[in-house]
Amino acid sequence: MATAELIKPLTTADLLAFPDDGIDRWLIRGELREEPMTKRNRWHSIVLVVLSSLLHEWRTRSGAGGYIMGGEAGCILTHDPDTAVGIDVAYFSQEVIDRQGDDTTLVDGAPILAVEIHSPSDTQQNIREKTEVYLDSGVKLVWNVDPHSKTITVVGQDRLPVLYNITQTITGEPWLPGLTIAVKDVFPY
């Protein structure tokens, strides 16, 4: 009779030990996820820069502190088992930033806002899983941005998803007080 082998969950250290070989890797509850590196396109890049700028303006204006990070900001969301992901754009509170050491390569702690900008290779299953993982890990607000349909789906803790189009405005309330963004401003093309 064969016995089932127990597979030990991977850690963030294990993830960081993989070579930089063109494979996109992240950990979800200690389980490795791999797929070919996403090929970015100009729409993805434009939206990333515009959203980062709009969030930076809000942060400066409001005096909120913390940091806006972009371009696959590395983040450890949970430990034991580890969840470590790259987030297209994230806003981390000053409290989370203050806990980081000088030698930190990944931010250890959940951001308040996680923004995923869809790429052509993204599947609905991947988008749904990442959104659930973010919310389960303490992220307060998730924006799923579709550069092609020019829509943003906003999902928050204890809230149903809401789809916004270019005729509408999104807010960061209650977690990002005073943040309002006209969706049309995110897609200047």
Image: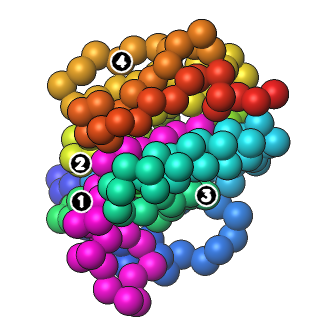
Q: Residue 97 colored magenta?
A: yes
- Compute the Cα span from label 2 to label 4: 17 Å
Decide which of tag 3 and tag 4 comes sooner along the chain. Answer: 3
Q: Secondary structure at mark 1?
A: strand
Q: Which mark is residue 137?
A: 2
- Compute the Cα span from label 1 to label 2: 6 Å
Give the magenta part as a residue range: 92-117
Q: Residue 179 placed where, x, y %?
A: 40, 36
Decide which of tag 1 and tag 3 comes sooner along the chain. Answer: 3
Marks 2,4: beta carbons within 8 A: no
Q: Residue 68 placed where, x, y %?
A: 47, 58
Residue under numbered circle 1: 78
Q: Amino acid at mark 3?
A: Gly
Could you tell me which residue is drawn at 44 percent across and 50 percent down?
Answer: 61
- Mark 2 or mark 3: which is in front? 3
Marks 1,2: beta carbons within 8 A: yes
Q: Quadrant of residue 71?
A: bottom right
- Compute the Cα span from label 1 to label 3: 21 Å
